[in-house]
Amino acid sequence: MRILFQGDSITDGNRYQDEERRWDLNHQIGHSYAFTVSGTLGARYPQANLTFINRGISGNRTQDLLKRWDTDTIAEHPDLLSLLVGVNDANGTPTPPGEFEKNLTELLKRTFEANPHLRVILMAPFMLNVGNYEDENNASVLLVKEYAAIAEQVASRYDAVTLVKLQPVLDRVCALREKKYWLWDGVHPTESGHALLAKLWLDAFEKMFVDSLPTPSGLV
């Protein structure tokens, strides 16, 4: 199974993006939740022949993904696509909610046309009121909540798409530690934040493939 992670800086994790440097396996997957997911699944199911690819790029919006979708997603021939995008759409000149929905729908449409058997984990975007976004009525934070609702609506149209809701969980865990403990600047997860994202991703994955996964190794 080829598992492709796609999105913005939250997924990118400062990976080596240049093709000529991807031989360096210390850096090809980055240090985001994708690293934790890849390491955990690889050790838990070593006999499953899983391949992990990260094509997240820092700063990307939905329209940026559309521009590189053919080369960075469809050409990678994933069996499972993991997609997290939205926070950059809410910053600078914001992407209107209607356009965000249109872009997200087009990304999925093009991918399913290329591979009707594809499975998708769609991670709803999230933010917390930290740093530049500390105001409870911050426009970017409120807009990301709209995007998350749109992601849920779009996911509901496809049987092959599993939605992972991140904002409600982040809101709950802020009762355990302050917001910046999870998202240090309101956008980017800390190590603990990435571990939380990875846990939610892994839960979704194992529910999706419960009938086809081999017996866990028991290592992790």
Image: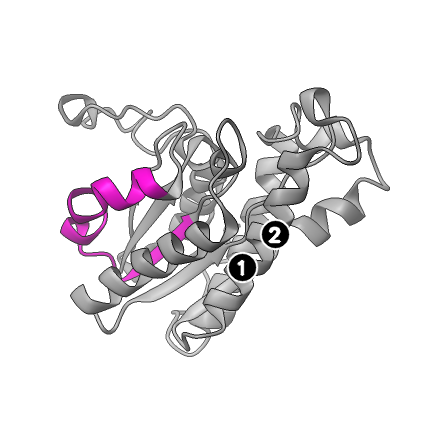
The vertical placement of 210 against 40, above or below, is below
Mark 1 Cα within 10 Å, few/some/many (few <14, many 20+)? many
The vertical placement of 150 against 139, above or below, is below
Say which element carries label 2: helix
User: Which residue: 44% across, 50% down?
Assistant: 100
Tell me if label 2 and label 1 are in contact, CB under 8 Å: yes
User: Which residue: 38% across, 62% down?
Assistant: 120
Q: Check disc 2 and give the amino acid type.
A: Glu
Q: Could you say which quadrant of the image residue 134 lies in?
A: top right
Residue 19: tell me if it is visible.
yes
> In the figure, is residue 199 to the left or right of 114?
right
**Which residue is nearer to you in this view: 212 or 157?**
157
Real-space CA distance between mark 2 and mark 1, rounded to the nearest whole angstrom: 6 Å
User: Which residue: 42% across, 79% down?
Assistant: 211
Mark 2 Cα within 10 Å, few/some/many (few <14, many 20+)? some
**Which residue is nearer to you in this view: 24 or 129?**
129
Q: Residues in magenta?
A: 63-83
Q: Is residue 202 magenta?
A: no
- The figure's colour scheme reads one colour
Q: Is residue 80 magenta?
A: yes
> In the figure, is residue 35 to the left or right of 49?
right
Q: Check disc 1 and give the amino acid type.
A: Ile
Which numbered marker is on residue 150? 1
The residue under label 2 is 146
